[in-house]
């Protein structure tokens, strides 16, 4: 019995070199490209398996133009045996649905073992920096019909199965995943090694294996624009609306901090503050507005009888997640536009008790699925249950929170339902789409709008296959206030459970905190970058928060993606594009570089204060006030100021409201 380890890799353009074409879409043809960062962790994990199974064959595979050869050869120089590329002009324009299908067919036809007794493991990076969807691993796994685990940061090879640790909101989950399987690796895992000299020499000698669609058994109608259920209708630049930063300085740090306290304690100018808030609040919607469309083509309702909006109520521990209530807000607005209803699905053991709460937050109907074997979320049985419900109810739209579970469930479900899905949306609305090729105006389309290319653009994604699916970034939409007087229907659904869906076992679930939920209700958030983990394990950050809390201020702490990726902070504390979007009255960024992915998660904060030792740091371009200095010296002064009565201009909370989980 032999073992094949296949690592899926993508070469991505640098976001800073992306340009918008005349058609309003992104042109990556002249941008410098590199191996996608997350994919490098997947490549390393394959090499780690080689240690346990020395005779394992390591294969790196990718889909893209011939220019990908550079990155594939780098994988060979790291220690891989073969490099395979699927390259065909007809693949151009493929969305994640079509990409997952094409890669799965490449694997089936050319790379997977022909002998059923031979084993294989597929690794991939968590997501790519150009799209940040995290869809393709789930969609490849669905097309291959194998189990999966995503957002994994630890892997142990155990012969017939892998023991993996998966990131979840508020902690980790340990799973036993049988081989064959698909595993997507998070950047909190083992960093990629450098190519060796021997490997570099080998990479020049190994021939690159290139395949076309004809060789893997697909046609141009199944991939590319023709085979993609979603398209990028347009992309617009994200415009800056915050005023230029005011740098605070003094003869020394003590005087500098004292100057900051005086500035923040000044009474706000109501007119200026109000005007700024109005401008900032309107910017995302204004940027995403489409130009008026001429209705010169016949209008076509593409839904074919599908109707209604379906949402999934995710449970964190023994309570519905906050993101599940948040998603009911845009769902409610969409339902009113479409004059339809919202059906929420809750799956688990003893979950009927949550139905009144879900209705109070905006659902018209709650479908309750109760079974002891569904007590905890597992991708395969949950995908099966929701698929059965979707086939019975035929919703036109299906919405999920962009949590670690939502980001793996939605794409697998989409491939199963032959539908498209848009990731990490910040705006959802209904519109029309003029298809000039087909000379038709399709309606009513879900316009799923999301930041992309390093948060520098807002892309409008439209799908024409129902259900139109999307995940929404946690914290982007505010949960509607609970209305206990709302009336709704509670239904029960008895699914057909397939034994094969329970091949993955949960060995342990550990949630250390309630998914960082208090970040959404905090009036002030103190966040740190990776230096705060490297130099003092976030001690000063936590001490400043504790000092504020002692004065009755609703304070909490967060972190940048780099701090999380380095393993200093749990994922539940991550703020930014792939973490949480927050709106505190005051946000303090400590030793954070200011990557646009982080800025997107904080841009709606009332005031942003940046503390960084580098005067050229990008965070100062997105802050209201800045201090240049070592945080190890600045924060102790701030802590003493807070103990003496300084509260960043905030008043102590008179009563505390429990946050949603």
Image: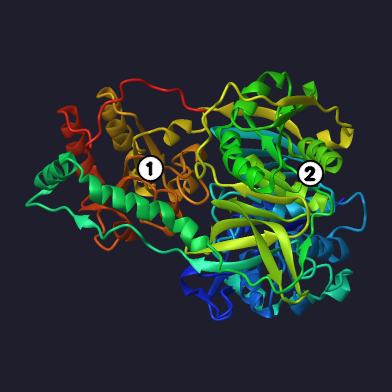
Residue at the spot 16% in from the left edge and 28% down from the top edge: 645
Total marks shown come to 2
Instruction: Using the numbered discs, state the Cα–Cα distance from disc 1 to disc 2 in whole angstroms.
Output: 35 Å
Q: Where is residue 295 in the image (x, y as percent from the top left)?
A: 68, 70
Report if residue 523 is visible in the image. yes
Q: Position of residue 228 (x, y in %)?
A: 76, 64
Residue at the spot 53% in from the left edge and 32% down from the top edge: 170
For label 1, the crowd category at 10 Å Cα-Cα, with few meaning under 14, some 14 to 19 and many 20 or more, is many
Q: Where is residue 652 in the image (x, y as percent from the top left)?
A: 27, 26
Residue sticking out furthest to the left: 251
Label 1 vs 2, first from the N-terminus = 2
Relative side of 338 to 631, left or right: right
- Residue at image mark 1: 533
Residue 20's label in the rendered image is none
Relative side of 10 to 618, left or right: right
Q: Taking 162 as reference, is 435 above or below it?
A: below
- Residue at image mark 2: 147
Q: Nearer the viewer, residue 395 or 546?
A: 395
Q: Which of marks 1 and 2 is in front?
A: 2
Q: What element carries label 1?
A: helix
Residue at the spot 36% in from the left edge and 51% down from the top edge: 278
């Amino acid at each position: 019995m032999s073992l094949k380890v296949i690592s899926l890799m993508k070469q991505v353009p640098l976001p800073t070199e992306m340009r918008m074409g005349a058609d309003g879409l992104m042109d990556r043809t002249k941008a410098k490209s590199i191996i996608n960062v997350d994919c490098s962790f997947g490549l390393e994990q394959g090499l780690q398996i080689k240690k346990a199974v020395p005779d394992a064959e390591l294969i790196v595979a990718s889909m893209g133009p011939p220019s990908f050869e550079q990155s594939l050869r780098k994988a060979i120089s790291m220690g891989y045996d073969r490099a395979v590329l699927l390259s065909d002009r007809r693949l151009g324009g493929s969305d994640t649905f079509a990409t997952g299908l094409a890669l799965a067919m490449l694997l089936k036809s050319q790379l997977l073992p022909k002998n059923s007794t031979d084993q294989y493991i597929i690794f991939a990076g968590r997501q790519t920096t150009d799209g940040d969807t995290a869809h393709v691993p789930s969609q490849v796994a669905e097309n291959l019909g194998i189990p999966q685990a995503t957002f994994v940061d630890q892997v142990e090879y155990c012969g017939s199965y892998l023991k993996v640790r998966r990131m979840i909101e508020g902690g980790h989950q340990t799973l036993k995943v049988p081989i064959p399987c698909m595993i997507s690796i998070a950047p909190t895992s083992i960093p990629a090694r450098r190519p060796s000299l021997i490997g570099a020499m080998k990479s020049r000698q190994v021939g690159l294996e290139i395949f076309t669609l004809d060789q893997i058994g697909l046609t141009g109608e199944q991939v590319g624009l023709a085979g993609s259920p979603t398209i990028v209708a347009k992309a617009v630049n994200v415009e800056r609306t915050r005023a230029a930063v005011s740098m605070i300085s003094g003869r020394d740090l003590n005087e500098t901090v004292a100057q900051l306290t005086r500035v923040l304690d000044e009474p706000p100018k109501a007119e200026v503050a109000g005007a700024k808030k109005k401008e900032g609040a309107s910017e995302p919607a204004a940027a995403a507005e489409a130009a008026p469309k001429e209705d010169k083509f016949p209008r076509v309702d593409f839904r074919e009888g599908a109707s209604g909006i379906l949402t999934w109520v995710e449970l964190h521990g023994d309570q519905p997640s906050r993101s599940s209530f948040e998603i009911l807000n845009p769902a409610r607005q969409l339902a009113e536009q479409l004059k339809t209803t919202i059906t929420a699905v809750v799956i688990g053991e003893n979950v009927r008790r949550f139905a009144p709460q879900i209705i109070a937050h905006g659902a018209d109907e709650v479908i309750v699925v109760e079974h002891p074997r569904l007590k905890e979320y597992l991708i395969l049985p949950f995908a099966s249950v929701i698929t059965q419900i979707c086939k019975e109810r035929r919703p036109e739209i299906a919405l999920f929170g962009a949590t670690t579970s939502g980001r793996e469930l939605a794409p697998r479900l989409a491939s199963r339902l032959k539908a498209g899905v848009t990731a990490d949306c910040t705006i959802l609305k209904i519109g029309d789409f003029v298809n000039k090729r087909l000379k038709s105006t399709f309606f009513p389309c879900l316009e799923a709008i999301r930041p992309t290319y390093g948060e520098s653009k807002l892309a409008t994604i439209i799908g024409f296959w129902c259900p139109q699916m999307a995940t929404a970034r946690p914290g982007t939409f505010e949960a509607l206030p609970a209305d206990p007087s709302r009336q709704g229907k509670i239904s029960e659904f008895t699914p057909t459970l397939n034994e094969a869906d329970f091949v993955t076992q949960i060995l342990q679930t550990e949630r250390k905190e309630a998914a960082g939920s208090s970040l959404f209700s905090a009036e002030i958030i103190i966040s740190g970058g990776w230096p705060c983990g490297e130099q003092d394990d976030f001690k000063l950050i936590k001490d400043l928060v504790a000092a504020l809390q002692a004065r009755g201020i609703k304070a909490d702490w967060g972190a940048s993606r780099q701090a999380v990726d380095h393993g200093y902070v749990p994922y539940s504390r991550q703020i930014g594009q792939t973490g949480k979007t927050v709106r505190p009255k005051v946000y303090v960024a400590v030793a954070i570089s200011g990557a646009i992915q982080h800025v997107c998660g904080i841009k709606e904060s009332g005031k942003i204060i940046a503390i960084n030792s580098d005067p050229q740091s990008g965070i100062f371009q997105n802050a209201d006030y800045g201090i240049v200095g070592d945080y190890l010296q600045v924060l102790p002064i701030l802590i003493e100021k807070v103990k003496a009565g300084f509260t960043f201009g905030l008043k102590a909370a008179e009563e505390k409201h429990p946050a949603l989980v």
